[in-house]
Image (spheres, helix red, strand yellow):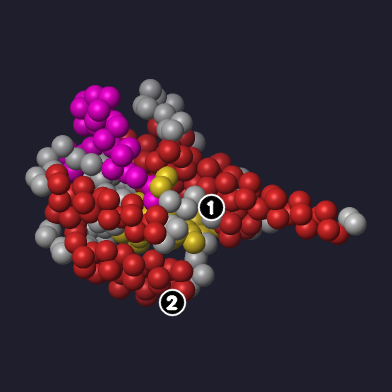
Amino acid sequence: MGAGASARADNAPACSSASARLKGQSAIPGLAGKLFRHQPIRILAIGSSSTEGIGASSPDHTYPAQLEDDLAALWKEPVTVVNSGKGGETVIQTIERLEAALKADRYDLVIWQVGTNDAINGVDETAFRALLERGISAVRQSGTEMVLLDQQYFPSIKDLARYERFVNAVSATGFERKIGVFSRYALMKEWNSRSPEELRSMLSADGFHMGDKGYDRLADCMADALQAMVEHSVAEARPTVTAAASVRDR
């Protein structure tokens, strides 16, 4: 039993509303098509410390590792999630690695975790939006589908108004570019609104990064959300397939 599967055996909150965390475009037809053809799936998870897994007890407890296990179990196909997280990075540093990764290899999906360090380290808001656009364009030009993963919520945010402007920038940019956004911020705020103790149980000792339990829940919720995106893609394709079959049968 994988880390995600074993951890779900406890009484942690479910992610039945995970699809509601998705903002913007919610179809990934290329990935859905590969699943339909029973082909292996390769995902690039790129970002800063939350992707690298700072706060996790081992690499197996990072969110990309647990997401790989969850998706393989859900889709019954080989799934590889490449962890390309690097703690402390702002968007400009991650973009350089993202562009290099897209040139070096092929992926079916990029999950770009972005924006926390930019919000707390004084990065200019306009420059941040422009760099988001650049990263999205790079992924699109490579022919790869994409999901954005927004900032974490944590109790000690110093400038909440600024921080939430950066959260909104990720959401708005995703909407404008028809890129799905999984709102980690909304998910973690919900945990906190139910009980501050619930949120604390998801965080590591530093009160900022997730711990094993939080990364497991994030992977659970993202797997559910990606499955919802696949189902949406199939539903969108069905009228086209039906129409084509109707023409052939005339």
**Residue at the (76%, 54%) spot, across then down:** 243
SS for dot 1: loop
Q: Start and end of the magenta stretch? A: 181-208
* Mark number, residue 27: 1
**Quick one: 23 or 35, which is closer to the camera?**
23
The answer to whether residue 228 is left or right of residue 23 is right
Image quadrant where one finds the C terminus: bottom right
Disc 2 crowd, CA 10 A, few/some/many (<14, 14-19, 20+): few
Amino acid beneath label 2: Lys
Check if residue 182 falls in the magenta segment: yes
Magenta stretch prevailing secondary structure: helix
Residue identifier under label 2: 103
Residue 156: name its quadrant: top left
- Of mark 1 and mark 2, the one earlier in the sequence is 1
Answer above or below: position of 40 versus 211.
Answer: below
The residue at 21%/25% (across/down) is 197
